[in-house]
Image: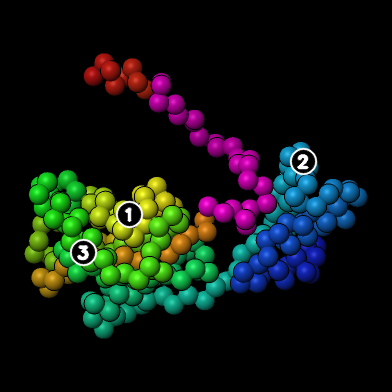
Amino acid sequence: MTLHIPTNLAVELQKESPDYEFVKNEIVSWFNKSNGQVFPPYDQLSDDQRYDIVVWLSKNYADFAEFLFTKKPTLHPQFHITMSKKISTIAQHHCPFCTDTFPMSTIPIVLPPHSYQSTNAKLKRAFLKAILYRFQEMPPGSHYLGKKVCLHVVFVMAKSRKDKDVDNMAKLLLDGLKDVLFSDDKEIVHLSVVKIQQQDPEEYIYVNIRESNLPNNENVFSEKLHHSFAVPVLDLKDFLEDVDNR
Ligand SMILES: [Zn+2]
């Protein structure tokens, strides 16, 4: 049997910023109508009732799924005139996970990237001081202190210089940005790091930051996981002994 999604629900789901409270309540009344039930509005559902709806939606997922996705036109960079154009295009990417309702800032830091692991203590301190200096005149509105953030970093390195690991460069940079651009590394809910090596000696960093709505989960009907993995469940305790005996 094909499930016929109510028109107003389908329309809302296809909007650029759906009203998720409306969506959830429409799903409940759609469920009620289709199953002869009288479940209360979304906010008053018991866990069991919510689970019943999840099971029903999952069973009919194939018919429902086409309304859960939208096609958004994104500009995909295909060709670049110069390396700096390529780099700045990559630095200004749109995040596929965190929605674009918040403004984003693309901030250049014209300082060669350093690696947390291979940089000595004195250089590390100098690097952190340089970052602090770079951000001392940022207008207050451009800070993300106390907010959950999506961070996209591009390290631009000269091919002539020793290659570095992206994770180690990111670690030192994040140390520098902590309490400067955002409150704590823990506030980063999405981190993406890109390394670009290019011919010129110039080296710099782009930081693209935006507030992330990823942790809201307002676009999720049931916040319980409801999954089963078809792979073994791993427990560190089972492997501790092997490590000790080595
Ligand atoms: Zn993101």
Query: Which SS does the magenta portion mostly show?
Result: loop
Local SS, label 3: helix
Q: Which region of the structure is painted magenta?
A: 215-238
Q: Determine the CA span between mark 3 and mark 2.
A: 53 Å
Q: Of the two numbered discs 2 and 1 on the same chain, state the one appearing first in sequence.
A: 2
Q: Residue at x 57, y 71 (%)?
A: 71
Identify the mark nearer the N-term, 1 or 3. 3
The three-letter amino acid code for the residue at tag 1 is Asp
Q: How crowded is mark 3: few (under 14 residues within 10 Å), some or many (20 or more)?
A: few
Which residue lies at the image location 60% right of the left edge and 41% below the top edge? Answer: 225
As helix, strand or loop, the secondary structure at mark 2 comes to loop
Residue 220, given in percent of the width and then of the height, sits at 63, 53
Q: Where residue 46 sits: x, y (%)?
A: 77, 41
Circle 3 residue:
133
Q: Does the residue labelled 2 lie within 8 Å of ligand 1?
A: no
Position of the C terminus, as image quadrant, is top left
- Nearer to us: label 2 or label 1: 1
* Circle 1 Cα neighbour tier, 10 Å, few/some/many (<14 / 14–19 / ≥20): some
Q: Mark 2 points at which residue?
A: 46
- Give the residue at mark 1: 179
